[in-house]
Image: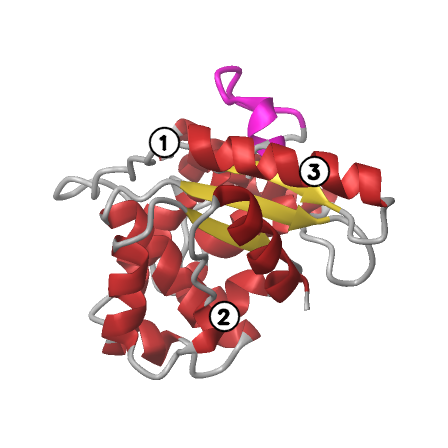
Amino acid sequence: MEARWLQGELQERLGGKAFLDSDDLRDLRELQESVRDSEVLVVLQSASVLRRPYVLLELYTAVQAKVPIVGVALTAGEAAFDFDGAGLFLEGLESTLDAANPGSSAVLTKAGVRLADASRVLASTVPHVISIALNQGASRNVLNATLADIVEACRAAKPLAPAEPPARGEFSGRRTPPGHEPPLAARLEAASTLQRFFLRLRLARCSPEEAERTGLQRGDAAPDADPAARRTL
């Protein structure tokens, strides 16, 4: 319902056609071509949006085709978008996607996209997407202001550059079989700034026993990670 409403509002304000992916999901190639032909991809960020393989395919295609992405995050009720959880979900996409939505990885595979590549590309770009908060229960004046912000964000959005694939021999946690991951302390040492941010989120949620076992205490974090990343997904 929110997506259809947003489609109509943006078409009126931008003066052009806004393609809604749910209008036609039968042909993945056509879906990808629609993304490549777009001036900007607007993603309605809900609690379950990243569990949809078609959304992941659209995001991946947009990044690869250098199509700017703008997020519109739902803020109220059970559908509210979880920024921290989204980052962790994308970082572990090879295991999280099918666990959350069995069989979803087959859609990406059919489109020629490896989960490892999707995880690398999306985890290194989606956290930098401009995101506008949306509460459809707000007053009309507030909604008009929100829509104006979305339109401005669409016009100002720039393409995002994904992280480069790891060099031969470089550690990549996503390639490690489940149950064989190195201790969090070692992963923190080897990871990029963005990965360190995600690992610290995981550490903050682990038990004292796990923290002691990994040799890393709560609060041990690389100082160069950007705390604002939590708010820019």
> Along the line of sight, which residue is nearer the eye, 11 or 23?
11
| Contact flag, marks 2 and 3 (Cβ < 8 Å) | no
Which badge, 2 or 3, comes first in the chain's sequence?
Answer: 2
20 to 22, vertically: above or below: above
What's the CA distance linking mark 2 and mark 3? 25 Å
* Amino acid residing under circle 2: Arg
| Residue 187 spot, x, y in % from top left | 42, 39
Task: Please provide the residue range marked out in magenta.
Answer: 219-231
Residue wearing tag 2 = 52
As drawn, the label of residue 146 is: 3
Q: Is residue 160 left or right of residue 212?
A: left
> Along the line of sight, which residue is nearer the eye, 3 or 220?
3
| Residue 131 spot, x, y in % from top left | 58, 38
Camera-nearest label, 1 or 3: 3
Occupied quadrant, residue 111: bottom left
What's the CA distance linking mark 1 and mark 3? 20 Å
Q: How would you rate the neighbour count of disc 1 (Cα within 10 Å): few for under 14, some for 14-19, many for 20 or more?
A: some
* Amino acid residing under circle 3: Thr
Most prominent secondary structure in the magenta stretch? loop
The local secondary structure at tag 2 comes to: loop
Q: How would you rate the neighbour count of disc 3 (Cα within 10 Å): few for under 14, some for 14-19, many for 20 or more?
A: some
Residue 173 visible in the picture = no
